[in-house]
Image (tube, helix red, strand yellow):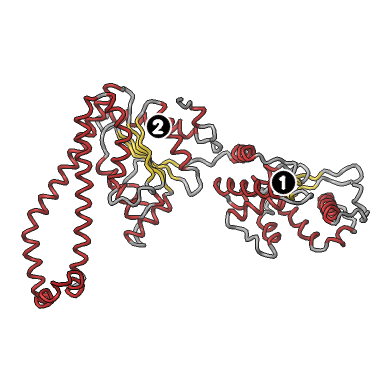
């Protein structure tokens, strides 16, 4: 059964379908514009988002959406293919999976596609030879003693020749090889030229049968690759695929990738500027609609409010959203924290409810790496980090027996009240507080005390409120 657009984006809690629709329209319009200008209908777009920004979710759904609209799509996990000697093999594999069904349906494409594959494999083979030469050059550069170790029986004769004799032998070898090296260089250039020409021809032939067809190559997880592999892949894209009807979408954490570039070229190298030469445009995901995302995740995990103790006028969503802001949590941090909260509720062995005003910021702060739950003063840390007014507000409305203005409280304020009272519980329970927020905390602690000790002996001022 073919997925519909609704099926594809059913789990889109970050609202990324709007990004996909915008980018598809943008890329389609941009390559059409290039075609009218007499330029290749090609483009390379970078989608820049940090770790946990939903890049992989977006790329897999974007691939399905593009296929649904009749395009050819190769989705490549760059990190999965990081072991390959040359990223060209990974690119060719993805393209083959995309083109093969079309070749089977239209046999006239077969001869052109064979030429594309032949040229592409020649390019990869040339790169492999170059890597082998670099290894050989390193061995020779390490001196006579190392060469003697490597070649065993030849050690004596090599050592007798000494460095001068070895240098003379190497000079002769280089002289004899120079012409072949030049021939190999020219052969490599020829393979590149043939690859681009034949790939462009192939895409035009496909468009005869499928008018609106474009080949999209989506590359994910590039920033997780070895720096040398990531750079080599971008070089391949830049120099080999600037042909008509081929669009690349590369998802990266550009900051992390620029650090990888520095690791190759040196700390003083401007990695960010270097990366701009590979991309025609960079697209940054807009901030997600957090309220929508949080509500969808809570519903998906089936987290009900019944097992939770929530302050008056606070909802679970309020606590989560306030904690996300306080700890600058990513969507991935939040998702995992909510999963942890769901597990905690499922395994909760006590009759007392889970104190949400403490537990929610604690799991989100822990998952974000900002809170160490093993510390004795963890409540003080939580309170200090969530006291800002933007991190959740609640108005404690006074009941009929209490008078005064409603209190406006933050998450941090409430955590601080719990912290103050829990360390001297019995004294706190005997105290008559005037502020309604303190009365609410006092009531919660009294209820918990009675449940834990299976006692109703305490009948202080709050037991009947």
Image position, residue 209 (x, y; %): 28, 21
Viewer-proximal residue among 40 and 205 = 205
Tell me the residue at 38%/38% (across/down): 75
Badge 1: residue crowd in 10 Å (few <14, some 14–19, many ≥20): many
Using residue 445 as the reference point, say whether residue 201 is left or right of it.
Answer: left
Image position, residue 369 (x, y; %): 58, 57
- The disc, 1 or 2, on the residue closer to the chain's N-terminal end is 2
Question: Which label belongs to residue 26?
Answer: 2
Q: Is residue 410 among the parts visible in the rendering?
A: no
Q: Is residue 418 among the parts visible in the rendering?
A: yes
Tell me the residue at 22%/52% (across/down): 128
Tell me the residue at 26%/22% (across/down): 208
The residues bearing labels 1 and 2 have C-alpha atoms spaced at a distance of: 41 Å
Image position, residue 21 (x, y; %): 45, 30
Question: Which label belongs to residue 393?
Answer: 1
* Placement of 150 over or under 110, stated as above or below: below
Task: Farthest residue to the front: give it.
Answer: 153
Quadrant in which residue 217 is drawn: top left
Question: Which label belongs to residue 311?
Answer: none
Tell me the residue at 41%/47% (across/down): 221
* Placement of 63 over or under 50, stated as above or below: above
Quadrant in which residue 164 is drawn: bottom left
* Placement of 412 over or under 396, stated as above or below: below
Using residue 339 as the reference point, say whether residue 304 is left or right of it.
Answer: right
* Placement of 406 over or under 24, stated as above or below: below
Cβ–Cβ below 8 Å for labels 1 and 2?
no
Using residue 403 as the reference point, say whether residue 22 is left or right of it.
Answer: left
């Amino acid at each position: 059964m073919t997925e519909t657009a609704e099926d594809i984006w059913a789990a889109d809690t970050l609202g990324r379908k709007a990004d996909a629709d915008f980018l598809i329209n943008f890329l389609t319009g941009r390559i059409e514009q290039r075609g009218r200008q007499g330029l290749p209908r090609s483009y390379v777009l970078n989608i820049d988002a940090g770790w946990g920004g939903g890049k992989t979710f977006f790329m897999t759904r974007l691939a399905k959406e593009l296929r649904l609209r009749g395009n050819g799509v190769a989705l490549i996990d760059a990190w999965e293919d990081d072991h390959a000697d040359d990223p060209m093999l990974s690119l060719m594999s993805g393209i083959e999976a995309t083109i093969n069904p079309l070749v089977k349906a239209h046999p006239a494409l077969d001869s052109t596609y064979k030429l594309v594959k032949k040229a592409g494999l020649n390019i990869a083979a040339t790169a492999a030879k170059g890597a082998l030469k670099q290894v050989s050059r390193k061995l020779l550069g390490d001196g006579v003693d190392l060469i003697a170790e490597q070649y065993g029986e030849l050690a004596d004769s090599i050592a007798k020749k000494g460095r001068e004799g070895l240098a003379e032998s190497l000079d002769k070898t280089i002289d004899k090889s120079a012409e072949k090296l030049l021939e190999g260089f020219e052969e490599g250039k020829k393979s590149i030229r043939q690859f681009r020409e034949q790939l462009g021809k192939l895409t035009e032939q496909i468009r005869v049968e499928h008018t609106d067809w474009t080949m999209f190559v989506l590359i994910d997880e590039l920033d997780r690759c070895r720096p040398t592999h990531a750079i080599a892949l971008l070089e391949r894209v830049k120099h080999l695929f600037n042909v008509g009807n081929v669009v690349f979408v590369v998802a990266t954490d550009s900051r992390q990738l620029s650090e990888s570039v520095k690791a190759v070229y040196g700390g003083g190298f401007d990695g960010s500027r270097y990366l701009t030469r590979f991309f025609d445009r960079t697209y940054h995901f807009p901030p997600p609609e957090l309220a929508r995302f949080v509500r969808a995740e809570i519903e998906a995990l089936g987290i009900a409010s019944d097992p939770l103790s929530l302050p008056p006028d606070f909802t679970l969503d309020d606590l989560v959203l306030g904690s996300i802001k306080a700890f600058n949590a990513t969507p991935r941090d939040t998702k995992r924290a909510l999963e942890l909260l769901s597990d905690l509720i499922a395994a909760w062995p006590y009759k007392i409810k889970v104190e949400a005003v403490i537990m929610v910021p604690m799991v989100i702060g822990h998952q974000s790496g900002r809170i160490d739950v093993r510390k004795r003063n963890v409540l003080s840390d939580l309170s200090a980090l969530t006291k800002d007014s933007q991190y959740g507000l609640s108005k404690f409305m006074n009941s009929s027996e209490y008078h005064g203005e409603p209190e406006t409280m933050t998450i941090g304020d409430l955590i601080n009240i719990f912290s103050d009272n829990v360390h001297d519980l019995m004294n706190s329970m005997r105290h008559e507080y005037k502020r309604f927020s303190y009365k609410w905390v006092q009531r919660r602690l009294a209820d918990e005390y009675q449940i834990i000790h299976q006692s109703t002996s305490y009948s202080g001022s709050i037991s009947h409120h």
